[in-house]
Image (spheres, rainbow, N blue to C red):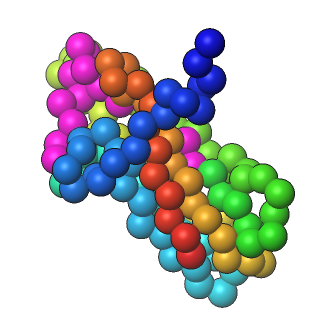
Amino acid sequence: MTKLTETVKSGDFKNEKHVPEIEASFEGGLVKVSVAVGKEIEHPNTLEHHISWIKVFFKAEGAAAPVEVGSYEFNAHGESDVFTVPEVKTCFKSEKKGTVYALSMCNIHGLWENVVEL
């Protein structure tokens, strides 16, 4: 039996259109995060092939486990010629720097991850 964690893929977002690209900053206790899929190599985002969601997690220095910061669904895949772009921006407070994790789900190619240290 395969564990879920064994199915998560990663790679370089500049060479792979499914990897969530993370930009993050820590300014006076405020963490600003931007996550996009397909920024360097555009993802098709059609009804047949699209990013369904992005999840953002944060693990503060010294914490035992990451905390889910947000979960973002993308639901328009061509209805009335509307196509979502898998990109999110979020902000949260933390007394400590830490690690930002992002997961993205492609309906065909599965789960993808990326990590950035602050």
Expressed as whole percent of the image width and height from the top left, the position of residue 36 reads 35, 50
Q: Please identify the residue farthest to the front as the structure is shown.
A: 1
Q: Is residue 45 left or right of residue 88?
A: left
Q: How many marks?
A: 0
Expressed as whole percent of the image width and height from the top left, the position of residue 86 reads 35, 41
In the picture shown, does residue 29 fall above or below 66? below
| Residue drawn 66% across the image and 58% down it | 58
Q: Main secondary structure of the magenta part?
A: loop
Q: Is residue 10 visible?
A: yes
Out of 7 and 28, give the one closest to the viewer. Answer: 7
In the picture shown, does residue 7 fall above or below 93? above
| Residue drawn 57% across the image and 49% down it | 56
| Residue drawn 34% across the image and 48% down it | 11
Q: Is residue 112 left or right of residue 40?
A: right
Q: Please identify the residue farthest to the bottom as the structure is shown.
A: 28
Q: Is residue 15 left or right of residue 113?
A: left
Residue 44 located within the stretch drawn in magenta: yes
Q: Is residue 89 visible?
A: no
Out of 2 and 101, give the one closest to the viewer. Answer: 2
Q: Is residue 110 left or right of residue 50?
A: right
Residue 11 located within the stretch drawn in magenta: no
Expressed as whole percent of the image width and height from the top left, the position of residue 10 reads 40, 44
What stretch of residues is rendered in magenta? 41-56
